[in-house]
Every structure is written in C-alpha cells, then in structure tokens.
Image (cartoon, helix red, strand yellow):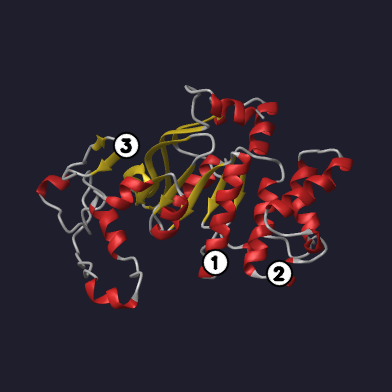
Amino acid sequence: MEKDKLKMEGNSPPLLKVDNLSKKYLIKKTLFKKEYFKAVDNVSFCIDYGEILGVVGESGSGKSTIGKLILKLIQKDSGKIIFKGKDIDNLSKSEEKKFRKDTSVVFQDPRTSLNPRLKVYQIVEEPLIIHKIEKNKRKDKVVKAVIDAGLDETFLNRFPSELSGGQRQRVAIARAIVLDPDLIIADEPTSALDVSVQLQIIKLLEKLKNEKNISLLFISHDLNVVGNISDRIIVLYRGKIMEKGKTSDILKSPKHPYTKILFESLPPDHPSHRKDLTAIPEIEREDIEGGCVFYHRCPVADEICRKEPEMKKFQNREVYCHFA
C-alpha cells in the first residue's frame, strides 16, 4: 500500500500539513463597521502517517471548523492545507476525486449521520457507489468493513433504528473505512455514547489505526478521552492553539494556564479524591484587542498579556503564553 511505503521512508513528508489556517464569520454589520467571530485563527500543525492527533477544547473553540476546512466542507479565509504534498485548493479533477477517497469522517451523533431509511448494507455501500467501485467487488468490501468495525453480517439487513448507539457508531466507522482512507476526521465520535461504550469505540479506532495505518484527527471536548487515544495533542481556545505537543508530555506537565484549568475540571478518579479538587477561579475581565485571547479568564494574567504572546517552542512542545 502507498501509505505503508511512505511510512517506512524515514524522511517522508507528513500526510497532512496545515499552515496558518484561518476562518472567520460575520456576526454584526453596521453602516460603519463589521464585526467578525474568529472561528480558527492562524492554526498550524502536521499529522504523520499512522498518527492520531487529538484536538481538545470547549464548545466554540473551533475544533469542528478545523475538521470541516480540511475536508473542504467549508471554505477557508487564508492559510494552506497540504495533503500528501499537494495544496488541496489546487487539485486537478482526478486529484480531487482521489482526495475525497483518501479522506473520510465520523460525525458526533450516529442518530443523525446515518440515513434512517437505509439498511446497514446500503449505508456502508454508498461511498463505493459514489466512487464507482465495480458492483461485483462491493459486497466483499462492505462485509469486511462491517467486520473490521466490530459487527458481523447479521447487521447488514438492519435499519439504524434497530441498533444501539454504540452499534450505530460502528456502522458509521465501517462507512468511513470502506474505501481504505489515509485520514479520518473523527469529530466527537464518543460524546453521544455511554461511558462504557466510549472506551470500546476508542479501542476500535486504535485497532484500526494500527492494522490499517490510518491517521486520525480526533476532536473532543474531553481531555480524558483525547489523552487515551492521541499520540499528540492540540489544546484550542477561541480558534487559537494554546498548547501543542506529545500527549505524554502534556498530561505529565501542562504548561499553559488554560490546559491546567482543563485538567482541574476533570472529575476525580475516585469519589474520596473530591476534597482534593482545586476550585477553578471565576475571573471576569474585558476582552482586549491585540492581546492574549485567554486574558479575560486567565488566573495569572498581567499587563504584559495585553500584548500578543509569541508561540514559545520547547522540546516537543509549543505554548502560546508569556509565562511559559
């Protein structure tokens, strides 16, 4: 396979390179002024072959917008997205078709992402029809994808309404892998599931990554979930990267105040540890133009934070903070 060959080459370029990606939305317009909401603000990162990159942040931080921009579901304002060494905005017709085949997505809620009028077989077969895979090859590919997703052939004739939440998400994963993509955008794929089922889906995605050398951009608001599956983590706030680095480094020693707050907000691993929780300070400051985007909530903010911080680089880590 092409992706296996590229992974074996020591100095091969990353599968995906995102450079200074930005997206804003007009929220208010008057005769003299326009106000914009910056959903994504100069975001840069790479994903290697067979790597899981976790993107974590609260609602409205721009996580899902990044995924949609990569998949070309919405149009970026500026920046570059390079997939397999090619700018996705300058693809030929055949390259565009290949890009659509090599990228896939698993959405948050399988109740809305699966067509309730189609049976499981039809749902998983649909990408094969769109990409004009020969009819006599489709059944084997559908069955293999369903089995790889942890189901069996008895599910092929069922409707989504006959399945549990975890089973529906496995069908969504089968649909995502049926074309053997290189990159899957997993947009909050466990948030609509019970905690016990979440772990099963995480283990399944890890298994698929290892067996098929699939890369994932794993989006979540839950630092625990991201920490369990990701090789590296991006911490996002108001469309801007606060901290980026190896998962083990960030989990062991978070450097940005926002990352630390995310850790402090995690529930304890045992009820007896509740008394050890540190209260997260409620801070109210006015937003400032041109300064740190986290200024209004940061417990260590000072006058210097009224100026834009530079992204400080450490070994295997980048931190957007004056005090890092």
Circle 2 SS class = loop
The C terminus: image quadrant: top left
Circle 3 SS class = loop
Image height check: is 128 above or below 107?
Answer: above
In the image, which disc is placed on residue 220?
none
Which of the pair 68/184 is nearer the observer?
184
Q: Residue at x 67, y 63 (%)?
A: 168
Q: Are marks 2 and 3 in contact (CB under 8 Å)?
A: no
In front: label 2 or label 3: 3
Where residue 166 appears, as percent x and y from the top left, is 62, 65
Which of the pair 28/143 is nearer the observer?
143
Where residue 275 appears, as percent x and y from the top left, is 23, 76
Q: Splitting the image into 4 quarters, where does residue 115 fall?
A: bottom right
Q: Is tag 1's residue or tag 3's residue first in the polypeptide sequence?
A: 1
Q: Look at the image and tell me whether residue 31 can be seen.
A: no
Q: Give the residue type that dot 1 points to.
A: Ala
Q: Is tag 2's residue or tag 3's residue first in the polypeptide sequence?
A: 2
In the image, which disc is placed on residue 316?
3
Residue that lies at the very extreme toward the right in this rendered image: 136
Residue position marked by numbered label 2 in the rendering: 163
Q: Give the residue type that dot 3 points to.
A: Asn
Image height check: is 191 above or below 102?
Answer: below
Residue position marked by numbered label 1 in the rendering: 192
Q: Residues within 10 Å of mark 3 (few under 14, many from 20)?
A: few
The N terminus: image quadrant: top right
Q: Residues within 10 Å of mark 1 (few under 14, many from 20)?
A: some
Q: Residues within 10 Å of mark 2 (few under 14, many from 20)?
A: some
Q: Is tag 1's residue or tag 2's residue first in the polypeptide sequence?
A: 2
Where residue 251 appears, as percent x and y from the top left, is 32, 52
Which of the pair 231/133 is nearer the observer?
231
